[in-house]
Image (cartoon, rainbow, N blue to C red):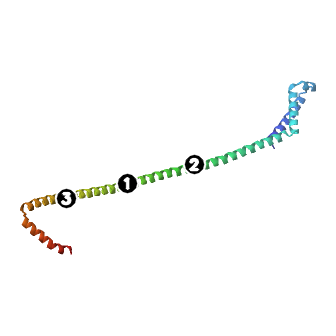
Amino acid sequence: MSIFRLATASLAIGLAVFLLVIHRAEIPTMTLFQNPEFWVAVGFAIVLAIFLRLRVPAMLAKLLDARAAAISKELDEAKRLREEAAGVLASYVRKAAEAENEVAAIITDAKAEAERFAKEIRAQLRVQIDRRAQMAKEKIEQAETAALTEIRAIAADTATAAAEKLIAARMDEKRSATLVEASIKELPDKLN
């Protein structure tokens, strides 16, 4: 039995008891009609009768059920949205962790690349320094060789000039003619 029907039944019983008490108190009927409480009770009973006739409790129950269903639907939607938001949050947390791991990997790779590049540059620099040192050594050797060659040439020129002066001082015509004849005789042997 619904609460509204229970309340209506209780009101009807209360009205019946009220009328019975008034009847036993031997209040004249005309006085009853002049009593404002009586008219309030009658008006209330009429309103209740109209409400029952128009099925207002059923309409109220239907409205309340519809509102409860809407609230339940909203709660289900809110629960679904909360779960979806939790999933999105977990996805973003996972993506953030992946991004952090990727950043750490990039930093590690960059450090390794920088280290490798530095080693490579050091090796290239060492090779270049060694090559330049070798080139400098070769230039020094060439300069030494050129200097020795120049010194030898100067020494040869000086020796030739000295020998020329010495030969010119000791050579006379007779010796000169003998040397020319000996050279002419040796010439055919040297040409063959």
Which quarter of the rendered picture does the N terminus lie within?
Answer: top right
Q: Is residue 85 left or right of residue 188?
A: right
Gap in angstroms between the C-alphas marked 3 and 2: 81 Å
Residue 175 shows up from this direction: yes
| Residue situated in front as seen by the camera: 6 or 66 | 66
* Residue 16 quadrant: top right
Q: Residues within 10 Å of mark 3 (few under 14, many from 20)?
A: few
SS for callout 1: helix
**Tag 2: Cα neighbours inside 10 Å, few (<14), some, or many (≥20)?**
few
Label 2 sits on residue: 92
Q: Is residue 150 above or below residue 174?
A: above
Q: Is residue 5 visible?
A: no
Q: Which residue is mark 1?
A: 121
User: Is 35 situated above or below 169?
Assistant: above
Mark 1 or mark 2, earlier in chain: 2
Determine the CA span between mark 3 and mark 1: 39 Å
- Identified by mark 3, the residue type is Leu
Tag 3–tag 1 contact (CB < 8 Å)? no
Judging from the image, what secondary structure is the residue with disc 2 in? helix
Q: Nearer the viewer, mark 1 or mark 2?
A: 1
Label 3 vs 1, first from the N-terminus: 1
Q: Quadrant of the C terminus?
A: bottom left
In space, the residues marked 1 and 2 are separated at their CA atoms by: 42 Å
In the image, 35 versus 151, the foreground residue is 151
- Near mark 1 (Cα within 10 A), the count class, few <14, some 14-19 or many ≥20, is few
Amino acid, disc 2: Tyr
Q: Which residue is mark 3?
A: 148
Q: Residue at x 43, y 54 (%)?
A: 113
Residue 169 screen position, x and y as percent: 7, 60
